[in-house]
Image: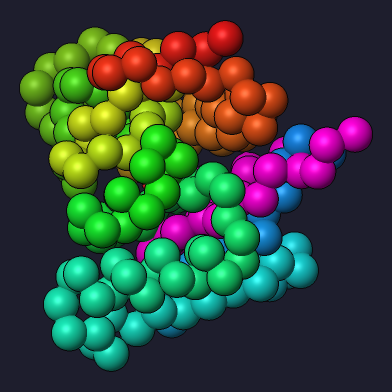
Amino acid sequence: MTKPLRVGVLLSGNGSNLQAILDAAGDDYAVVVVVSDKAHAFGLERARSAGVATIYVDPKAHDGRESLNEALADVLRENKVELVCLAGFMRILAANFVKAFESRILNIHPALLPAFPGAHAVGDAIAWGAKVTGATVHIVDEEVDHGPILLQRAVPIESGDTEETLHERIKVAEHELYPEAIRLFAAGRVKVEGRRAIVL
Ligand code: GRF
């Protein structure tokens, strides 16, 4: 039996995706550390309740993005993290971080990329009048919400949807999709070829 893949999660807020990832962990992967740029992120409490190490990295203690990103990468290296999962981490990663974990960083986004990138994806899909949106797990590169797409799931937009009701349904999809993506990774079934993430 091979050892579980060592997963590190970066978050800034509630952490419902972290919870889904924690709940699905097992022989194939383990969350070994949860890192936040917000001292009081509820996600850190979820991690503590699950007995997972938590680390707060204070952005104000760092002189600029590069230095903060180096500190984040250091924490993950110290914990021997093999796969980094962004789960509502509200900062753009710098090139030094992306290079340090090249093709080993996943992000979850509440839309079907490349539609509706950015921080307001759910509201943007409603405002555009889209009939379908969804969730995307992609590999992180140096551009925001841009890297190779690993998994996607569609979620229909109902006529009475508000940003809150729609986001809630998207999160149901996210909570299934993110652990599934990590399991694929843990099984060595993800191969990146240029813009494409191929599931073997
Ligand atoms: C999710 O909708 C995710 O797609 C986006 O941020 C949200 C985080 O939610 N990147 P939570 O903190 O996991 O509940």
Among all residues in the image, which is located at the extreme bottom? 61
Tell me the quadrant of the picture where the N terminus can be found: top right
Q: Nearer the viewer, residue 194 or 93?
A: 194
Q: Is residue 14 left or right of residue 48?
A: left
Taking the spot 72% from the left edge, 49% from the top edge, the residue there is 30
- Residue 114 visible in image: yes
* Residue 19 picture location, percent across and down: 62, 51
Q: Is residue 31 left or right of residue 72?
A: right
Quarter of image, res 197: top left
**Colour mapping:** rainbow
* Residue 71 picture location, percent across and down: 37, 75
Taking the spot 26% from the left edge, 18% from the top edge, the residue there is 195
Q: Is residue 98 above or below residue 199?
A: below
- The reply to whether the magenta stretch includes residue 2 is yes
Quarter of image, res 53: bottom right
Q: Is residue 99 above or below residue 155?
A: below
Please state the extent of the stretch shown in magenta in the rendering.
Answer: 1-24
Among all residues in the image, which is located at the extreme right? 1
- The reply to whether the magenta stretch includes residue 19 is yes
Q: Nearer the viewer, residue 72 or 34?
A: 72
- Residue 45 visible in image: no
Q: Nearer the viewer, residue 69 or 56?
A: 69
Among all residues in the image, which is located at the extreme left? 128
Tell me the quadrant of the picture where the C terminus can be found: top right
Taking the spot 19% from the left edge, 21% from the top edge, the residue there is 114
Quarter of image, res 170: top left
* Residue 46 picture location, percent across and down: 63, 64
Q: Is residue 130 left or right of residue 47?
A: left
